[in-house]
Amino acid sequence: MESRETLLGQVLDNQPPYRIKQAQQAVYKLLVSDWAQASSLPKNLRQELQEKVPLDIKAEPINTGGALKAVIGLDDGLSIESVCLRHKHRNTVCVSSQVGCPLDCLFCHTGKLGFNRNLTAQEITDQVLYFFRLLKEQEQTVSNVVFMGMGEPLLNYSQVIEAIKILNHPDKFGLSARKISVSTAGITPKIKELSHLGLQVNLAISLNAPTNELRSKIMPVNKKYPLPELMEAVEQYISLTRRKVMFEYVMIKGLNDSPRQASQLASLLNGLLAVVNLIPYNGGGQLSAPSQQAISAFKEILSRNRIQATQRYRLGTSIAAACGQLLYQQGQSSSRRPLKSVGQADGE
């Protein structure tokens, strides 16, 4: 299916040049979900756009506590999940880049789905647009976007980069590049490619182990892109961009949470412009999270070795929207309410 931008270009091809900017402003600034609301455009043009350039986003919101999750329906009948993490002074949208994920990391529920397909740039940015519209109803807005949802962003590199450009474009979402973060399990050729683009986005590495052997057990992708190769790519990224890299470390009781492993991690990251984000395991099954005492001790060892470390505050666990929990089974919609567009009331 052709993108909204392509369809807009086709409809507005014979219009004055300023019409495209008016249309973009209606979509990305005024956040209209119906072209009839775009009062700056002539009525006949609004009618044509309504027929040829749909603005609806089918979604089912699930809201509990500090997080808002949405199951978003795609045109081919597949679905993805997106999350908005709500803090006092910011709203961060966690977007998916693939339907499912091919990497099958030990701690991640999404990987159990397997891989279906990559998302298009519009399917990625529509997740953000959905939450922009939703938050507008509450007189709030989206402040940050993180590529940490379903899928591995750097395995959908071209569409993710295109989505970032749309998010950053001043005539579209207008988000600062420094408010956009891309998390990867370590696709080293694409990390190197990203380092040459000149984008000021944040890079996060899903690390989860301080040694090559353990990381291969937790993350099968490490067998293709081993830890030494990954660290070389990260060092190149930091050298070229002068940007701090975040290392995400999902803590699993009895597997990667020992004091010795904390010391190994400190040695691995010694001298890097980096911060470690400690994330208690959120899922169920045979794995479990360490005690808070163990997490604090791990963090203390990093701090003593001058490695900056933070612990992620849990948001979204109650609605399966926390790290590694996005898991929408295709065909499961029969047990859910029908997907609907933002602004559409129940029963419409």
Image (cartoon, rainbow, N blue to C red):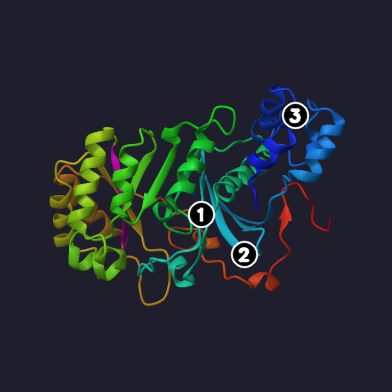
Front one among 40 and 345: 40
- Dot 1 or dot 2, earlier in sequence: 2
Labelled disc at residue 96: 1
Q: Is residue 330 visible?
A: yes
| Identity of the residue drawn at 35% across and 43% down | 203
The question of residue 248 being in magenta is answered with yes
Point 20% across, 43% down: residue: 235
- Marks 3 and 2, the one that precedes in the sequence: 3
Looking at the picture, how far across and down is residue 218, in whole percent? 29, 68
Dot 1 surroundings within 10 Å: few (below 14), some, or many (20 or more)?
many
Which residue carries the number 2 mark?
78
Q: Which mark is residue 14?
A: 3
Q: Position of residue 206 (x, y in %)?
A: 32, 55
Instruction: Find numbered disc 3 in the image and state the secondary structure of the residue it sits on.
Output: loop
Foreground mark, 3 or 2, reads: 3
Instruction: Return the x and y of residue 64 as percentages of the image width and height.
Output: 59, 56
Identify the secondary structure beneath mark 1: loop
Label 2: which secondary element:
loop
Check disc 3 and give the amino acid type. Answer: Asn
Dividing the picture into quarters, in which one does residue 111 lie? bottom left
